[in-house]
Image: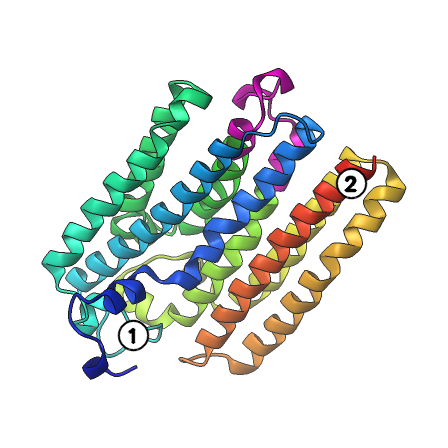
Amino acid sequence: MDKEIIRKNSFKAWLLAARPKTLTGASVPVMIALAMAYTDLQGNGFRIIPAVLCALFAFVMQIDANFINDYFDFKRGNDDETRLGPKRACSEGWITPSAMLKGIIATTLFGCAIGLPLIYYGGLEMIMVGLVCVVFCFLYTTLFSYLGLGDVLVLIFFGIIPVCVTQYLCAAPTAGVGLQGINIEGLLIALACGIVIDTLLIVNNYRDIDNDRRAGKKTLIVRIGKENGLRLYLVAGIVGAAIVAISLLMMFPLWLSLISIVLLLPYLLLHISTYKDMAIIGEGRELNKTLGKTARNMFVFGLSTAIAIVLCATLI
């Protein structure tokens, strides 16, 4: 993609800066949460408006996080010629830093505006949930990623919080499901979601291990090394799928759970295949292909899990 064909601050430039492919990570927790809410309600009284608002909030906050990452990495000088990942808007000159700063303000405010009506459905505690999500967007790039906390935060903000909160908001009050009433099966599936989404961060940090060391980023991969990072990638995907399988066995009759667990096999096969590709490639920009395949795998996981949950709830 040549600089010449992308006009500065154009629509195409903003579209590239938004990184549409990363929206997979935002969609997976919502898909799973909607399936869980459907199960809680047994198909009756599902709240459509909170479902739409939660999905929009997740997408906008993901774009906001991408803008923040683009801007602050440019300011820190991390996006130089040694960068191995996909091109970034500020460093390529597609978007000026001042325009990106305005974009960050706009997407943050837009995200807050989308989340505001959720107070009606979830109560005043939604204000705190929203504020925590916004703060996470800013602190991840500017602080937490340098401290090696990225993987833990992915478990929380791409697993537990979006799945549990969306499930709560989409269930009618009569379902008896509140934030304090999320059951162990729901928490386990939320955790599995976060673990699988973390495989994307593992690939990203595996590819960038040398640059991260130079930049002083103490990512998990920097701490444990490349060989262990490769093993972690494989294990994370398998563990995520296993947790979902265990949760289904806890939630539904054995025969029904076993049938639904079969739906997870395509994800596992894709994940193992991607792991093998990652091991062969080893390093360099070619790992961006592994990143793309991992995003695809995540979506397959989310869709398979959601279908399995709904199928069990329908047939029980």
Instruction: Identify which residue is drawn at 39% across, 57% down.
Output: 219
| Residue named by callout 1 | 83
Decide: is 162 above or below 77.
above
N-terminal label among 1 and 2: 1
Residue 83 on image: x %, y % = 29, 74
Residue 75 on image: x %, y % = 15, 61
Check disc 2 and report its element: helix, strand or loop: helix
Q: Which residues are magenta?
A: 166-189
The one nearer the camera, 200 or 236, is 200
Q: Main secondary structure of the magenta part?
A: helix
Q: Quadrant of the N terminus?
A: bottom left
Q: Amino acid at mark 1?
A: Arg
Residue 60 on image: x %, y % = 35, 47
Left or right of 133, for residue 107: left
Decide: is 41 above or below 92.
above
| Residue named by callout 2 | 312
Check disc 1 and report its element: helix, strand or loop: loop
Q: Quadrant of the C terminus?
A: top right
**CB atoms at circles 1 and 2 under 8 Å apart?**
no
Instruction: Identify which residue is drawn at 65% across, 68% down.
Output: 270
Q: Amino acid at mark 2?
A: Cys
Q: How is the image coloured?
A: rainbow
Left or right of 123, for residue 42: right
Instruction: Identify which residue is drawn at 44% across, 42% down.
Output: 157
Q: Is residue 170 magenta?
A: yes
Q: Is residue 144 magenta?
A: no
Q: Is residue 3 visible?
A: yes
